[in-house]
Amino acid sequence: MHTSTAPSSAPLPLGASRYKVLVVDDQADAADSLGLLLAQMGYDTSIAYGALEGVRQATTFLPDVVMLDVHMPSIDGLDAARAIRSCRLSSHPVLVALTADTRPGAKEATLAAGFDFHLTKPLPAGDLAALMRDVLPAP
């Protein structure tokens, strides 16, 4: 699986550190697009193209936020969220479920798996920016 860290050119206040966001999605185009958007917003991003790689990266990248697709082959996002939570990472990441699933019970299932937020794809950029402002303290 290919992983990448997208550098950001957004300026930061002197002495401020960038927040880290891990994007996990088996659809490379979706993962890359979201990672690029987050990098343009000023976040350090890392991308994993599957749940197992996402769990691995969560333990080394120590993200502040994990944007995790729910429906992936082999291991789905629900199991990946449970695995990330069980690692008890020092970064205590906010887990955001991303899914196109609008069936009744989908949101409850993600929250029960340990996600903090459940968002439906496609996610408008303005909604993403608002979420990030809400979940991360100002630098």
Image (cartoon, rainbow, N blue to C red):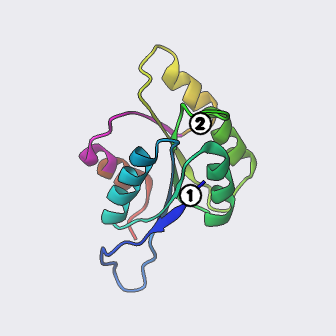
Q: Position of residue 101 (x, y in %)?
A: 44, 23
Q: Position of residue 71 (x, y in %)?
A: 54, 31
Q: Secondary structure at mark 2?
A: helix
**Residue behind mark 1:** 2
- Pinpoint residue 106: horizontal percent, then vertical percent: 51, 21
Task: Report whether 61 appears left or right of 34.
Answer: right
Residue 56 on the magenta segment: no
Q: Amino acid at mark 2?
A: Gly
The picture places residue 51, in percent across and down from the top left corner, at 62, 43
| Mark found first going from the N terminus, 2 or 1 | 1
Is 78 on the left or on the right of 130, as rendered? right
Image quarter of the C terminus: bottom left
**Is residue 107 positioned above or below 42 on the image?**
above
> Residue lying farthest top?
104
Queried whether the magenta region covers residue 121, the answer comes back as yes
Mark sitting on residue 113:
none
Element under disc 1: loop
Rate crowding at label 1 as few (under 14), some (14 to 19) or many (20 or more) other CA atoms within 10 Å: few
Q: Nearer the viewer, residue 56 or 16?
A: 56
Residue in the image at 46% along x and 76% along y: 17
Query: On the picture, is 27 further left or further right than 50?
Result: left
In the image, 12 versus 29, the foreground residue is 29
Please, what is the three-letter code of the amino acid marked with disc 1? His
Compare residues 11 and 137 and report the one nearer the observer.
11
Instruction: Count up the numbered dots.
Output: 2
Q: Identify the magenta region.
A: 116-128
Q: Which of the two discs, 2 and 1, sits closer to the camera?
A: 1
Q: CA distance from mark 2 to mark 1?
A: 18 Å
Toward the front, the furthest residue is 1
Residue that mark 2 sits on:
77
